Image (cartoon, helix red, strand yellow):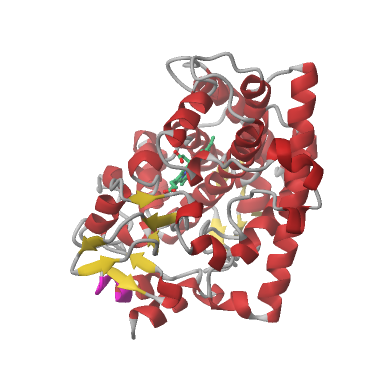
Amino acid sequence: MTPEQAFAEAMKFENRPNPYPFFDELRKTPVARTAHGIYVVTGYKEIIALAHDPRVSSDLRNGSLLAMIRGGDSSGAPSDADSGMAEMLDKYGGDTMMILSDPPDHSRMRRQAMRHFGPPHCPDLIPSMEEYSVRIVNDLLDKLKGKHRFDVVDDYAYPLPVAVICKILGVPVEDEKQFHVWIAEFLGGMDLGPEAATEEGKRRQAKGRESRTELTKYLIGLIERAEKKGGEGMIAQLVHDTGPDGRMSSSEILQNCILLLVAGHDSTVNLLAHCVLTLLRNPGSIDKLRKRPELIPRAIEEVLRLESSVQFFPSRSALSDIEIAGTTIPSGAPIFLMYTAGNRDPAQFPDPNTFSLERDAKESLGWGAGVHTCFGGPLARLEVNVGLETFLRRVRNPRLVVDPPPYRPSQIFRGPLHCEIEIDGIEDRGAS
Ligand code: HEM
């Protein structure tokens, strides 16, 4: 199989439940040129090197990727061709989000956002979400009492992170029904696989663009309201920022709020669902974690290594020719750092396809690497810890109904669409 064929297979929807044999195939050439001149990187050490290389840009405007994926432009930036918001572009167009920018703008935006999210300025925000998360997951399980079957994704993994990120940003959680559909369609339209060229693929991309526009308009509404009336949460804090870096531009605020709303829940849902799925696939691990809950944080990192929620982020390109692993990546070429493949590189993780509670997976690429390493990791870890610990304590004898479960379409954000389980019941809150 050529690298090009292996990459196309790994991206195909039908292989979403198990793309790993194709990543193994690709890793035979750790830096491989594939369709459209994309350089796909699957070796752990090559990913680490490129993620830290200042000659690699995350700004879509620097490479040829933007033109290639214009149909499903992942920047979230409104364009007058499809947004119908020309009058707003002066204020809300032009700038981009931190994940699609390079230093020094990247470092500035990250600092400006972090001031309202984590230490040293907001050391209590993330810890204060623990009690809220515990309440949410217990309420969710209380609602499932009397049932013998439920969907781990819709009934449990999704509602927790969405409620938490809404609270942090100051987005009304009652709007979730509306933006859930927009976000699902927006992400579903970002297809980087062979199916993008089919009629169905084109329909999904068009729908994705429409939904992105709706999401953008919705967030502009929240930003304008915060400008006039202030309010609780990060949106209002970013709008009225008085920190040493000043205020982000209006379009940076918009773009980063889209990023925080989407990134702030989507991958967490996938990780929590994958935790349940992986434990159910590995008999004995549930009992072990029930007896030794102190191993739960380690189990979560190991699940993220094994089933990366973010397989890659298609933003990077070479700013000059880069020699690596016997290949020259030419200036301007798109580069996909396949975290998901690096996480199963046997040179870094012996017996990489095995879930092991003995493994120390802290070198995993599940949170990315380099300057764009996940901004929200501590929050996601807290949520998944609470979600998993409560699940293990209260859900009696969970069994998978179908394996593999159906997967979501996105190649970038990989996770089950649903994960039905049968159970013997739900324990009371206080039971141990
Ligand atoms: C299990 C959950 C999560 C996983 C697996 C995850 C994974 C990642 C990865 C792999 C990246 C790097 C992307 C790249 O290389 O370009 C990233 C970046 C980012 N994540 Fe997360 N993420 C999670 C949760 C969150 C949460 C809860 C938030 C927000 C509260 C968040 C916000 C961000 C932001 C803003 C970036 C961009 C950082 C930058 O460009 O400097 N993520 N995430």
Front residue of this view, candidates 217 and 133: 217
Q: Would residue 267 be counted in the magenta stretch? A: no
Q: Which part of the image, by quadrant, shows the N terminus?
A: bottom left
Residue 289 seen anywhere in this rendered image of the structure = yes
- Reply above or below: 192 against 209: below
- Reply above or below: 298 against 136: below
Residue 277 percent coordinates (x, y) = 49, 57
Q: Residue at x 41, y 41 (%)?
A: 372
- Reply above or below: 70 against 264: below
Front residue of this view, candidates 379 and 116: 116
Residue 147 seen anywhere in this rendered image of the structure = no
Residue 429 percent coordinates (x, y) = 61, 30
Magenta segment: 25-29
Task: Tell whether 110 sits left or right of 227.
Answer: left
Task: Tell whether 324 sits left or right of 375.
Answer: left
Task: Tell whether 429 sits left or right of 110.
Answer: right
Residue 13 percent coordinates (x, y) = 55, 73
Residue 145 percent coordinates (x, y) = 70, 42
Front residue of this view, candidates 141 and 114: 114
Main SS of the magenta part reads helix
Instruction: Report the number of discs.
Output: 0
Q: Residue at x 44, y 57 (%)?
A: 312
